[in-house]
Amino acid sequence: MDTVKLKSIGIVHSPYPELHGMPIQPVGAKGVKGSITVNKEYEEGLKDLDGFSHIILIYHLHKCNGFSLRVKPFLDDVKRGIFATRAPKRPNPIGISVVKLDKLEGNTLHISNVDILDGTPLLDIKPYIPHFNAIDDEELCIGWFDDKHHEAKDKKSDKRFLD
């Protein structure tokens, strides 16, 4: 298997210094403010980003050790295959979140709806474009999650994926 090396482009700052009690998805973090400090060497790449209301953050789940191919997700009592969940304990500990971009100041992005641990290394930023990212509801199927999605807004993280 090939090894892939990635370099952090910045750090996510949030009000969550620990996993316990953190929202599990942006839907449960409405209005939660945070910021991103992009490394100065990448600041020029932020040009024109302030024209977007939402951005996709791709980040390293740096507190996860190891992985499990079957996990009990936050919203279920049944063990599921890791690739059928958004659980963090993955072979490649990569997370994604769509957040609101409130303001861009130099190399600092002020964001809302933050469900990310403070100090998380940021790997990439992409603009959220509904025309590219949204799926027609008629084609949408969300598997085992279909009867659980309404619970995500109030669910908080715990320590289940730390060990």
Image (spheres, rainbow, N blue to C red):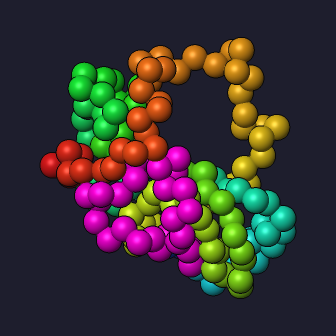
Quadrant of the rendered image containing residue 137: top right
Q: Position of residue 160 (x, y in %)?
A: 20, 45
Residue found at x 42% / y 66%: 120
- Quarter of the image with the N terminus is top left
Image position, residue 47 (x, y; %): 81, 73
Q: In this view, does 143 lie above or below 41?
A: above
Residue shown at 69%/70% (left/top)?
Answer: 102
Where residue 91 appears, as percent x and y from the top left, is: 34, 40
Left or right, residue 142 beside residue 79: right
Quarter of the rendering containing residue 107? bottom right
In the image, 63 versus 4, the foreground residue is 63
Among the 4 quarters of the image, the one containing residue 105: bottom right
Asked if the magenta segment contains residue 18, the reply would be yes
The residue at the far left in this view is 163
Q: Can residue 93 be seen in this view?
A: no
Q: What stretch is highlighted in magenta?
A: 12-38
